[in-house]
Image (tube, coloured by chain):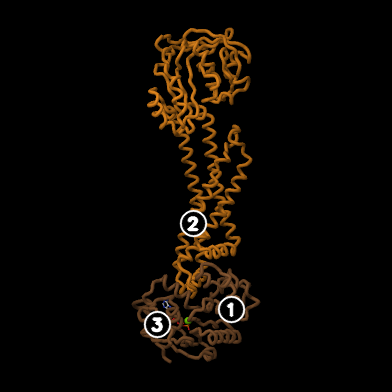
Chain colours: A brown, B orange
Amino acid sequence: MSLLTVTNLVKTFGSGDTETRVLRGLDLTLEKGQMAALLGPSGSGKSTLLTILGTLMHPTSGGHDMLGVDLTTASDAALTTFRNLHIGFVFQFHNLLPDFTALENVVFPAAIREGRETAAARSRGADLLTRMGLAERIDFPSANLSGGQKQRVAVARALMNAPELVLADEPTGNLDRASALQVMELIGQINREEGTTFLISTHDEKIAATCARQIVVGDGVVSG
Amino acid sequence: MLYALKIASRYLTASKAQTALLVVGVAVGVFLFIFMSALIGGLAEFIMSRTAGDMSHVTIEAQAEDPGQIATFPGLVLLAHDASSDAAELREALNLMPLIEVMPEVLAVSPQITGAGLLRRGTRVAQVSVVGLEPGRESAILNLAGYMVEGDAQLRSGVILLGRALALELGLELGQSVVLQSQDGIDATLTVTGLYQIGQGGPDRRMAYVSLSTARTLFAMPQGVSRIEIKLHDLYAADAVAPRIEALTGLPAESWTVNGAQLLEALNAQAQTGYFLKTFAMITIVIGVASALLLSTYRRRPEIGIMRAMGASRLFVVGVFVTQGALIGVMGGLLGAGVGYLALLPFPPRDAFRSGTLPMDITQGAYGLAITLTVIGAILASILPARSAARVDPVTAIGQ
Ligand SMILES: Nc1ncnc2c1ncn2[C@@H]1O[C@H](COP(=O)(O)OP(=O)(O)OP(=O)(O)O)[C@@H](O)[C@H]1O
Ligand SMILES: [Mg+2]
């Protein structure tokens, strides 16, 4: 069963001489529970595609459906709520709120949903952190965590509201090979156990190889 | 929005030095506000108590020309002796007084008989304005009792109260007697039972207070009075109350503002200056808070982007920054008000103002108003930064 479909997706930046056509009629369908790697040369539009899929940016044209909702016509407020409930993010940089603890960061999406930090959310957050091997770091100020630890906190946070889709833009780009593989291993485990769909952009073939599907972007379309 | 409060307070505690500086800055503005309120209020109170507070707010005066003063020689005055002038009196006034007294705006009513007279003590002579007051109401308008330096202010038949300066001039002491000759040529020998010092040359040298009954004899006025002085709870109500008294009694009632325009202007100018300075204190607070928060929104752009990506609404982001403004306002307001109160404590209370010190009135610090305005100001100041924070584009902010 498909989770999301984009059809004939076009994204153009700028206009006139500086016009950059990044996506040129891209079609893509992600199945529920899929673990997919997003590959392609630098500048091919991986981040652009993830941003559009994450509803953080509108495409220039094309269709975007997820969970049966037409996201191209939804209002900003509707998209904000949709993101909160159905999409998790892991970014390469600037992932965590530095003035908050690991647990407070993880609980954030639930607190936004509920309007406050509930005990249930805290206990789920602590569970997620424990699964990420961070049981010792639950109440640690996030600014003091190592790079690999920060990315694992970010993965835990992406999972907090049990979203159907997690988008990760080079989540291991900053990490050494061992930490990167550890993060991928944890992501794979969640994917198998909870059926969460992952789309992970990476430059690293070894990282991509841990995913069941490899999607390659080139010339603004999916090429493989 | 409880959660926005948590984020806001964490942001403030995360950069403690910066927050402390900001709160102190706001507190200085609040302190200034309170200091100005206390000073302007105190000054007004001071001037009032020295002048307007001691005067009649609404006066009913018999309509007649003053006994014309023909010429003044040192120590001697010639008065026009005209039978029609001393007949200027309010005959029905005493019957109408209860009507005035029951008006809720009215604080005190004092019927008076006034006229000119000569005080003689041996070879020394002094010209005085004589005021006959009803015993028991000596301090109803002018707080005579408060100005007594010797003896007391209680009037009865056969006694006279004089300014200490005049008594000294005449070589009079408490308990001694003096002859008072009225403009009608009637003599009375009176005993000095009180000496006052008001501090202004006029009343201390030129006034003499006697009882209403003594004045009746002196000025040959067996029934009426020549003037009724009325004091109101709120002297600024005088313009509204005077015509009502006139309508009620049919007697000509005049508000103090008719002749006290200058005083009123001075008081208004003072209040204006106060508003001006207080407005500037508030503007300083608003600019300080706005610029500090604007910097903070800029510094936190990536975080704002993350929050937006996680599903935080624009309204939530606005809430976080407006709450920061409100918290700074509350803390700065309380601190400034607290310090302001402590700074005003050493000043003497309002009824003990001394010349040479600032007449600060701690009760007029307007603490609640200062805190309320500060919180409102800080919230308004945070709207611009909050809006700019809410407009942060998650994509560019996270990409930084
Ligand atoms: N806001 C923007 N304005 C103009 N051009 C943009 C903007 N965002 C991206 N681009 C351009 O779009 C193209 C694709 O960028 P994108 O970041 O999606 O590539 P990427 O595949 O993620 O590259 P990398 O592997 O280096 O991260 C690039 O040429 C980039 O310069
Ligand atoms: Mg990229």
Q: Secondary structure at mark 2?
A: helix
Task: Identify the mark at residue A22; answer none if there is no mark.
Answer: 3
Disc 2 vs disc 1: Cβ atoms closer than 8 Å? no
User: Alpha-carbon distance for marks 2 and 3?
Assistant: 43 Å
Image position of A145 with respect to B209: above or below:
below
User: Alpha-carbon distance for marks 3 and 1?
Assistant: 36 Å
Q: Residue A101 appears in which quarter of the rendering?
A: bottom right
Disc 2 vs disc 3: Cβ atoms closer than 8 Å? no
Residue B10 picture location, percent across and down? 57, 64
Disc 3 vs disc 1: Cβ atoms closer than 8 Å? no
Does mark 3 have its CB less than 8 Å from ligand 1?
Answer: yes
Q: Residues within 10 Å of mark 2 (few under 14, many from 20)?
A: many
Residue B170 picture location, percent across and down? 59, 13
Which residue in the protein does label 2 denote? B379
Q: Residues within 10 Å of mark 1 (few under 14, many from 20)?
A: many
Which residue in the protein does label 1 denote? A128
Q: Amino acid at mark 3?
A: Val
Residue B74 picture location, percent across and down? 51, 12
Q: Of discs 2 and 1, which sits in the foreground?
A: 1
Q: Residue furthest right?
A: A136
Q: Residue B8 appears in which quarter of the rendering?
A: bottom right
Q: Amino acid at mark 1?
A: Leu
